Structure formats: C-alpha cells, structure tokens
Amino acid sequence: MEYTGSQYIGEFVDGRMEGKAEYILPTETKYVGEMKDGMFHGQGTLYFPSGSRFDAVWEKGLVVKGRYTFSDGLQYDAENWHYCDSYDRRFYTEICHGLKPAGISQLTNMDPPREIPPGWYDCGDGFYNPTTRIVKDYRGRFLRNAGRMLQSPPWQRVCVSLRVALARLN
C-alpha cells in the first residue's frame, strides 16, 4: 500500500488481503466488501468521490454482475438505457423535479452546475483537458493521463486501476 498510496482495513491470510475489508484508493474511491487471495471476491461496493456507487458480485477480481447508481439516485441499465437520448433530452433531476420555467436553462444534471475550468470538459470523475490529455479530479489533483479509457464508464476505469494497483502488491 505504501507504493500505491492506498489504504487497507481488514485481515490478511498468508500475506494477502482476505475476508471483509475496506480498500481506499488515493483517488478516494473506496471498496467495501469481501476479498479473497488479494482480490475483490464476493459481494462488494465501490463508492466514488462524486457520490455514485457500483454494487457488484466479484469473482477473482472481475465483475460477475453489478449495478451502477449515480449520485442523484439514477441507476444505469445497460440493456434499457434511454437517459438523455434523442427522444427525451431531460436530465434526471428534470425528470424527478420538472422543467425550469421558460427562459431559465438547465445545462447539466447538477443544478447549479459545478464550475468547469475554461477549455476543460467534465468527464464524470473529474475534468479532462484535451490540450494536455490529462484528467484531474474535481479538487484539481492529477488522476490520470487520458487515453481510450476516457470513453469507458467510471466503474470500468476503476476496475482496471484496481487490477494494476493490486498486481503491484502481489
């Protein structure tokens, strides 16, 4: 953990993380659940700094099935996802609380929206700068260099990051 900046609260068996545990990444993403042989295994939840979460069943570090819930309560459904599509462009908060009066626009689901630095884009877990190709978290701390992973859902990015971090420990 000293090399990755992560924190682990739980038991070890033969030098590997095992049993019910809490694993906190330097990005403040937190896993709470079961570990086996140093990997996520069984029921577990990833809690993201944004307030969203990913509840899943894991097998040897891989997701078997899971459900992603955004910080506002909206649940992602890969097979039936019509959120903000061409037929209904309302944000989830507009679906729940209604549209703003004429003349008042809502530009993001978060109302009021967080301030985005000029020339940067909100990518779900931070801000992306297309000039430097880096992503910083919402507090301005470096998260990663951008690449193909930027187009992946946040839980996939975390799963890959966790596999890399856990591989370094083992």
Image (cartoon, rainbow, N blue to C red):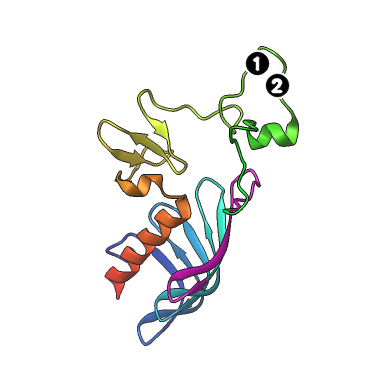
Q: Which sits in the foreground, 44 or 102?
A: 102
The residue positioned 73% from the left and 36% from the top of the image is 96
Q: Is residue 63 magenta-colored?
A: yes
Check disc 1 and give the amino acid type: Ile
The residue positioned 29% from the left and 45% from the top of the image is 147
Secondary structure under the numbered disc 2 in the rendered image: loop
Above or below residue 112? Residue 92 is below
Q: Position of residue 167 (x, y in %)?
A: 30, 70
Please report contact status of discs 2 and 1: CB closer than 8 Å, yes or no. Answer: yes
Q: Position of residue 154 (x, y in %)?
A: 46, 50
- The residue segment tinted magenta is 58-77
Q: Which sits in the foreground, 97 or 169?
A: 97
Residue 51 located left or right of residue 62: right
Secondary structure under the numbered disc 1 in the rendered image: loop
Check disc 2 and give the amino acid type: Lys
Give neighbour class at mark 1: few <14, some 14-19, many 20+ (Cα, 10 Å). Answer: few
The residue positioned 34% from the left and 40% from the top of the image is 135
How far apart marks 2 and 1 lie (CA) works out to: 6 Å
The residue positioned 61% from the left and 29% from the top of the image is 111
The quadrant the N terminus occupies is bottom left
Q: Is residue 107 magenta-colored?
A: no
Q: Position of residue 73 (x, y in %)?
A: 66, 47
Q: Residue furthest left?
A: 132
Residue pointed to by mark 1: 104
Above or below residue 59? Residue 102 is above
Residue pointed to by mark 2: 100
Q: Quadrant of residue 7?
A: bottom left
